[in-house]
Image (cartoon, rainbow, N blue to C red):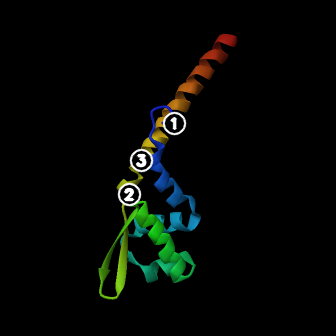
Amino acid sequence: MVLGVKPAHANPVFRALADPTRRAIFEQLSRQGEQTVHALTRYAGVSQPAVSKHLTVLKRARLVRHRREGRETHYRAQPDALAPMVDWLDHYGAFWRDRFDRLESLLERMD
């Protein structure tokens, strides 16, 4: 644990969203709401098997949930799963704000 942050909680989310296609799928679900794999495939511009693999990674990171309805699977975003990443970013945001405040103070004293 570095500087009081537990990166292990944020790692699956960071890993899942590191891929631009997965990020785009997550953003699409966040903006447009629940969608089928077929709708996501049309949006993503990659094959259905590729979209399914991306959705599996997003599910493992708990960023999406799914439900079956007949032959179709519907996915929806779970934005609350971003909380570990948000906490990590908040922590380092505070860290860097403090460092820049110290730098500003030093520069003012040097003048």
Residue 64 in picture, x, y percent from top left: 39, 65
- Residue located beneath label 3 in the image: 84
Where 105 falls versus 67 (above or below)? above
Mark 1: few, some, or many residues within 10 Å (few <14, many ≥20)?
Answer: some
Q: Is residue 103 left or right of 83 when viewed as pictured?
A: right
Indicate the amino acid at tag 1.
Tyr
Residue 87 in picture, x, y percent from top left: 42, 42
Residue 66 in picture, x, y percent from top left: 34, 72
Q: Is residue 1 left or right of 104 when viewed as pictured?
A: left
Mark 1 vs 3, N-terminal side: 3
The C terminus: image quadrant: top right
Indicate the amino acid at tag 3.
Pro
| Marks 1 and 2, how far apart at CA | 21 Å
Mark 2: few, some, or many residues within 10 Å (few <14, many ≥20)?
Answer: some
* Quadrant assignment, res 60: bottom left
Q: How many marks?
A: 3
Inspect this view and state whether residue 61 appears: yes
- Residue located beneath label 2 in the image: 79
Q: Is residue 103 left or right of 35 when viewed as pictured?
A: right
- Residue located beneath label 1 in the image: 92
Residue found at the far bottom of this picture: 71
- At mark 1, the secondary structure is helix
Q: Which is more foreground, mark 2 or mark 3?
A: 3
- At mark 3, the secondary structure is helix
